Image (spheres, rainbow, N blue to C red):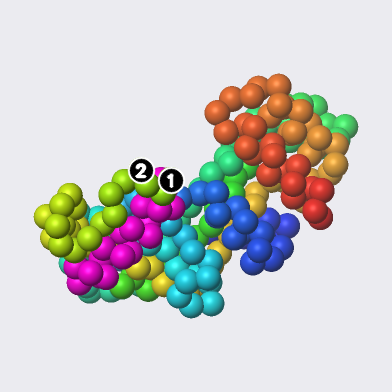
Amino acid sequence: MLIHPWDAARSTAEWQRWLATRDFGQLAVNGLPGEPPFVQPLHFAYDPSGGGEFGSALAHLARPNPVWPALDADPEVLLSVVDAYAFVPGPWQAPPGAPAEHGTPTSVYTAVQLRCRAHVVDDPREKAVLLDRQVGHFQPAGTTAPVASEGAPFARMLPGIRVLRLEVTDVRAKFKYAGHKPREVQDRIAAGLAERSGPGDTAARTEQRRRRQSA
């Protein structure tokens, strides 16, 4: 992922704040020899204080998932999260004083890529603790029975899944919202997103405004 200086995260806190409200991404795993990379969409729970310098993420997958042999061969993976994205038509980006048709279309978005070392957890007790922690991220307390390695209702299901503890070792974050463009162009993009108000436009405009105000 190419990150220009004007698109880069201004601090660790910036991308962690953004990631705190996201919990679905794609896990990219190196393929076995002769095979392409394996990409698995999944929910995850990110904990900035867990694990190493950049925290950790918890996820789980079914035991029959074909990702496991690739993970056994190489535990270095990438968890990719993209959101607050929108298409920007060319006329919105036309340079000041230039004809609208001279503008170049582009995309705006936020992308955070977590490089991780994957640790596969199969111990029933440890698995139950981590699953409880992950479920607790998504559901209010008391709405699901606790996961336990013995007894109903979930113990019999534990052998069918494996937990992934993703130790985050590096982070690349990009906030692509035309931060290098003249103010007039940025205003035009913001106005266009507000008027169009399509899927993703409001979130993209919010991120653009936040970046501009904090510059």
User: Who's the residue at 53% across and 70% down the image?
Assistant: 49
Q: Amino acid at mark 2?
A: Thr
Question: Residue 138: within the magenta?
Answer: yes
Could you tell me if residue 34 is visible in this image? no
With 40 as the anchor, is 192 left or right in this view? right
Q: Is residue 9 left or right of residue 64?
A: right
Give coordinates of residue 68: x percent, y percent.
20, 64
**In the image, 113: left or right of 42?**
right
Residue 140: numbered disc:
1
At x 74%, y 46%, the residue is 210
| Secondary element at image label 1 | loop
Pick whichever, 206 or 126, lies toward us. 126
Q: Are marks 2 and 1 in contact (CB under 8 Å)?
A: yes
Q: Residues within 10 Å of mark 2 (few under 14, many from 20)?
A: few
Q: Residue furthest top?
A: 195
Picture quarter containing residue 194? top right
Q: Quick check: is 98 in the magenta stretch?
A: no
Q: Which mark is residue 143?
A: 2
Q: Which residues are magenta?
A: 120-139
| Amino acid at the residue labelled 1 | Pro
Residue situated in front as seen by the camera: 190 or 16: 16
Quadrant location of the C terminus?
bottom right
